[in-house]
Image (spheres, helix red, strand yellow):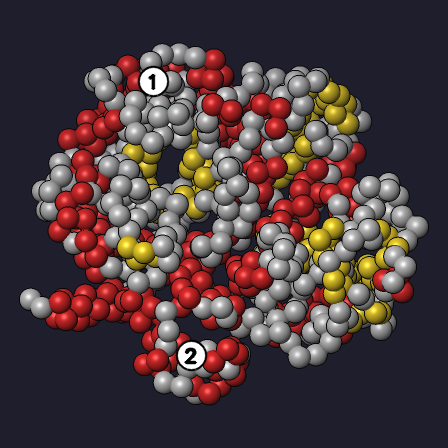
């Protein structure tokens, strides 16, 4: 076959793969079968790869799992090449051995579809399965190197998934399936993907002149006068086009997971659930909103969302990443409890936990709404790139202090799991996040010399609320009903549609409190800067405008209005020169030139109020601003009697009783002011009075169940 015919065939196959979703409806959460059975107790487990072990130790591993009260293992998602050593020739002997052993031990199993690491034979037979990215054509070796839209990959993945699910679905230990692994687009941007992107643009923009105008493509002769002239997007200097392509790539992930979800559901038992282990932005540990995936959209095809959360330990353990990842994942499906599919046991060498930290971490995950705590992984591998990413067991496979501490967690969860499962939150504070705003913000990074990102704005505001025990949900542009909230924090909503901004204005007008940071409302959904005074449509509700901004040098707030102290009172890396229209000035800049401009304003709008922050503050000042917002919205709780390193997180159990997790992120013992209704500590069984202080040891925890039925928390 000629090269041209091969190209045509590949384009046709990929087009069919990309269009398959039009004929295969996505199985949304609302369409999920009522027969699906989700956990009715807290699951405790680890990923287990019998394929990796250098010796046959399955019986010993299972015995050690039973001793640690392990109730679930996750298997199979990493070993496609072992399960299908040649095209169409399947070998499930490792899976069969593990399923038999787990069934005998009473341990449940989540089976992963092994599609994130393609086998060598597939790369040899179809080299086009390796993704073409801005860095060129992918080479075999690393995982997640494939083009998730490629028809040859899809065909092989479908055959693998169907064979695997058909093989294991009737096994009594199998309770659910994990799709792929930390799925992303992997920056796939080859000719076929770009052709599909252009086809989508043509549908969205039938008028080519309107497309050019909205995207500003006359600039530097980037104008597209014929769709056939459309250039390689990887070279674009146009943020509107780059961000539209990023949104398209996120859509590929949503569609790919929906395709897998539909496929698995068609072959699985009706009571088996489907999940996916999302991951977060990575900074050497889990950090912020994931750039490459719209988790809110992708979660719709799942029965239950899952998350991987990794974080610093030892002296750097704060619990912030645990809470952030948990709060975000719980919010993806409107408050549904989630599965913690991966977190570290020993982890990297610098993450080896101090005594007590493993227990503290586990209970912290439950405090955010996790229905499962699962470690990656059970026993550390003896070969390959993750040799030094250690599981519960080291390479010797013997007991160690981390494993022994896990045994105490397992024992507590075996006793308390049925009571603690499906705890519900009733939060009245939300943080508004947007993938679209994230990619738009990061396209410019605010000034030619600045490296600050969207997550650099988001996380300090979340962290400040966390340190003060003010719990939050996350919402995004798909959240149309805001009525359950009284306070919405909106960090750097750089790109947003008119409809989004009007919805937020309406929320404030109806009595809500909204807190905007700088660069909100600046551009529309196509990253076209609004040609009005900023902040665009938000100017009405915020009662403030500006049309100039700068990078601050030696700028502070006049008079230190929040008593933050000289160092914390400084402005950081961005400032807008605000002029109030109807708003009250809360703070002005202290500067010989910029001193006439407002820095923070507040405006009454309808029955509510809107605060606008024109600069990036210090962490200490953010904390004061956030707690002022909590107070003004009438949302303080007894949890605010404590402050980090004491963390208090609350919910409502299935029996209607309130429950409070008291967590000490400190190597020092602490006495925690309680302040809620009288109850008892579920870990010790001891009584706790409403006016009491609760003693916690170093890295200690208590779980207090109130005696009475609460009305609100």
For the point 49% across and 54% down, which residue is it?
291
Mark 1 lies on residue: 395
As helix, strand or loop, the secondary structure at mark 1 comes to loop
For the point 24% across and 45% down, which residue is it?
140
Which of 442/486 is in front? 442
Residue 636 as seen in the image, left or right of residue 267: right
Which of 692/447 is in front? 447
Question: In the rendered view, would you say 31 is above or below 656?
Answer: below
Give residue 375's quadrant in the image: top left
Question: In the rendered view, would you say 626 is above or below 173?
Answer: below
Residue 204 shows which numbered tag?
2
Give residue 252's quadrant in the image: bottom left
Question: In the rendered view, would you say 677 is above or below 477?
Answer: above
**CA neighbours of label 1 inside 10 A, class few (<14), some (14 to 19), many (20+):** some
Cα distance in 3D space between marks 1 and 2:
54 Å
- Return the x and y of residue 202 as percentages of the image width and height: 38, 80
- Return the x and y of residue 608 as percentages of the image width and height: 78, 64
In the rendered image, the quadrant that contains the N terminus is: bottom left
- Return the x and y of residue 118 as percentages of the image width and height: 23, 45
């Amino acid at each position: 076959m000629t090269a041209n015919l091969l190209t045509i065939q590949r384009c046709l196959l990929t087009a069919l793969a990309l269009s398959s979703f039009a004929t295969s409806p996505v199985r949304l959460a609302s369409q999920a079968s009522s027969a699906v059975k989700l956990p009715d107790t807290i699951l405790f487990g680890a990923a287990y790869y019998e394929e990796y072990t250098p010796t046959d130790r399955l019986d010993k591993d299972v015995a050690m799992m039973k001793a640690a009260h392990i109730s679930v293992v996750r298997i199979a998602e990493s070993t496609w090449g072992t399960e299908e050593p040649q095209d169409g020739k399947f070998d499930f002997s490792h899976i069969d051995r593990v399923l038999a052993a787990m069934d005998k031990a009473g341990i449940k199993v989540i089976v992963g579809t092994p599609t994130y690491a393609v086998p060598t034979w597939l790369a040899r037979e179809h080299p086009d399965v390796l993704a073409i990215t801005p860095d060129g054509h992918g080479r075999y070796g690393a995982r997640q190197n494939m083009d998730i839209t490629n028809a040859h990959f899809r065909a092989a993945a479908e055959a693998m998934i169907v064979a695997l699910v058909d093989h294991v679905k009737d096994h009594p230990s199998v309770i659910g399936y994990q799709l792929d692994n930390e799925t992303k687009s992997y920056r796939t941007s080859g000719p076929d993907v770009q052709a599909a992107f252009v086809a989508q643009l043509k549908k969205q923009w039938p008028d080519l002149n309107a497309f050019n105008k909205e995207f500003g493509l006359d600039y530097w002769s980037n104008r597209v006068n014929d769709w056939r002239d459309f250039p390689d997007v990887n070279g674009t200097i146009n943020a509107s086009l780059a961000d539209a392509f990023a949104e398209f790539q996120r859509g590929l992930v949503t569609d790919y997971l929906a395709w897998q979800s539909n496929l698995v559901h068609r072959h699985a038992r009706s009571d088996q659930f489907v999940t996916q282990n999302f991951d977060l932005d990575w900074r050497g540990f889990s950090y912020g909103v994931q750039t490459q995936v719209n988790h809110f959209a992708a979660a719709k095809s799942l029965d239950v969302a899952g998350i991987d959360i990794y974080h610093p330990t030892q002296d750097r353990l704060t619990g912030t990443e645990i809470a952030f990842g948990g709060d975000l994942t719980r919010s993806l499906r409107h408050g549904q409890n989630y599965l913690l599919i991966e977190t570290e046991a020993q982890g990297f060498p610098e993450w080896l936990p101090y005594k007590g930290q493993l227990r503290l971490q586990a209970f912290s995950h439950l405090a955010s709404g996790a229905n499962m705590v699962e470690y990656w992984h059970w026993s550390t591998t003896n070969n390959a790139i993750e040799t030094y990413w250690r599981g519960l067991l080291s390479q010797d496979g013997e007991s160690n202090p981390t494993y022994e501490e896990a045994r105490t967690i397992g024992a507590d969860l075996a006793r308390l799991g049925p009571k603690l499962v499906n705890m519900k939150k009733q939060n009245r504070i939300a943080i508004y996040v947007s993938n679209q705003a994230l990619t738009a913000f990061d396209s410019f990074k605010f000034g030619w010399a600045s490296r600050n990102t969207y997550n650099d704005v988001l996380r300090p505001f979340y962290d400040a609320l966390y340190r003060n025990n003010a719990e939050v949900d996350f919402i995004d542009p798909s959240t149309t009903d805001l009525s359950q909230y009284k306070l919405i924090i909106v960090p750097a909503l750089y790109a947003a549609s008119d409809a989004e901004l009007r919805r937020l204005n309406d929320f404030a007008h109806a009595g809500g409190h909204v807190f905007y940071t700088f660069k909100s409302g600046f551009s529309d959904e196509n990253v076209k800067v609004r040609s009005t005074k900023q902040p665009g449509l938000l100017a009405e509700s915020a009662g403030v405008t500006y049309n100039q901004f700068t990078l601050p040098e030696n700028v502070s707030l006049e008079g230190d209005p929040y008593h933050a102290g000289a160092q914390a009172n400084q402005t950081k890396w961005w400032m807008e020169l605000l002029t109030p229209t109807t708003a009250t000035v809360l703070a002005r800049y202290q500067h010989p030139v910029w001193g006439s401009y407002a820095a923070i304003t507040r405006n009454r709008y309808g029955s509510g109020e809107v605060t606008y922050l024109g600069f990036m503050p210090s962490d200490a000042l953010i904390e004061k601003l956030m707690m002022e917002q909590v107070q003004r919205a009438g949302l303080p709780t007894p949890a605010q009697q404590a402050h980090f390193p004491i963390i208090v997180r609350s919910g409502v159990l299935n029996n209607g009783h309130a429950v409070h997790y008291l967590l000490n992120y400190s190597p020092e013992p602490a006495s925690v002011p309680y302040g809620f209704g009288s109850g008892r500590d579920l870990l010790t069984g001891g009584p706790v009075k409403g006016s009491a202080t609760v003693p916690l040891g170093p890295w200690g925890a208590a779980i207090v169940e109130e005696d009475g039925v609460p009305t609100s928390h």
